[in-house]
Amino acid sequence: MDRTFDLQNITEVTAQNGDKLNGLAITMTGMVIVFLALVLITLYIVILPRLLKALALVLPPEHPAVKKPPRETDRDPLIASAAAAAWHQHRQGGPS
């Protein structure tokens, strides 16, 4: 087998390999950028609650939280049954 090397053949092979290497470099660069962005997002999510706690110490809320009083309900079964009977009569079209 006689192999002859000419300048045109060498430049074509180098150009093809160079294109493959450029594509690989671009791929790796993109993957590194995405990985670093995901790491930054993760760090932001982890650090944010701590920052908010520290900020709450410096800047108190404008209105302090007010607890609502417990809801009062009628627990008398006689009143509840009278209300239910009145509602039933109203829905049935009976005397009002």
Image (spheres, rainbow, N blue to C red):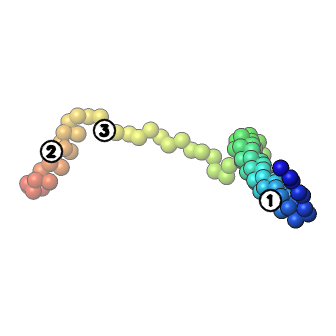
Q: Position of residue 39 (x, y in %)?
A: 75, 44
Name the image quarter holding residue 42.
Answer: top right
Q: Nearer the viewer, residue 92 or 3?
A: 3
**Disc 2: CA contacts within 10 A as few (<14), some (14-19) or many (>=20):** few
Q: Nearer the viewer, mark 3 or mark 1?
A: 1
According to the image, label 3 marks what residue? 74
Mark 2 secondary-structure assignment: helix
Question: How far is the residue under mark 1 from the one under mark 2?
Answer: 90 Å
For label 1, the crowd category at 10 Å Cα-Cα, with few meaning under 14, some 14 to 19 and many 20 or more, is few
Quick check: 56 above or below 92? above
Q: CA distance from mark 3 to mark 1?
A: 86 Å
Amino acid carrying label 3: it is: Asp
Mark 3 or 1, nearer chain start: 1
x, y (%) of residue 96? 12, 56
In the displayed structure, 14 sits above or below 69; it is: below
Residue that sits furthest to the right in the current view: 7
Q: Secondary structure at mark 3?
A: loop
Which of pointers 1 and 2 lies earlier in the amino acid sequence? 1
Q: Are marks 1 and 2 in contact (CB under 8 Å)?
A: no
In the visual, does 88 lie left or right of 2? Answer: left
Specify the label residue 87 is tagged with.
none
Q: Is residue 56 visible?
A: no
Dot 1 amino acid type:
Gln
| Residue hosting label 2 | 85
Give left or right: position of 84 versus 25: left
Q: Residue at x 19, y 39 (%)?
A: 81
Measure the alpha-carbon separation of dots 2 and 3. 16 Å
Residue 16's label in the rendered image is: 1
Instruction: Name which residue lies at 10% across and 53% down.
Output: 92
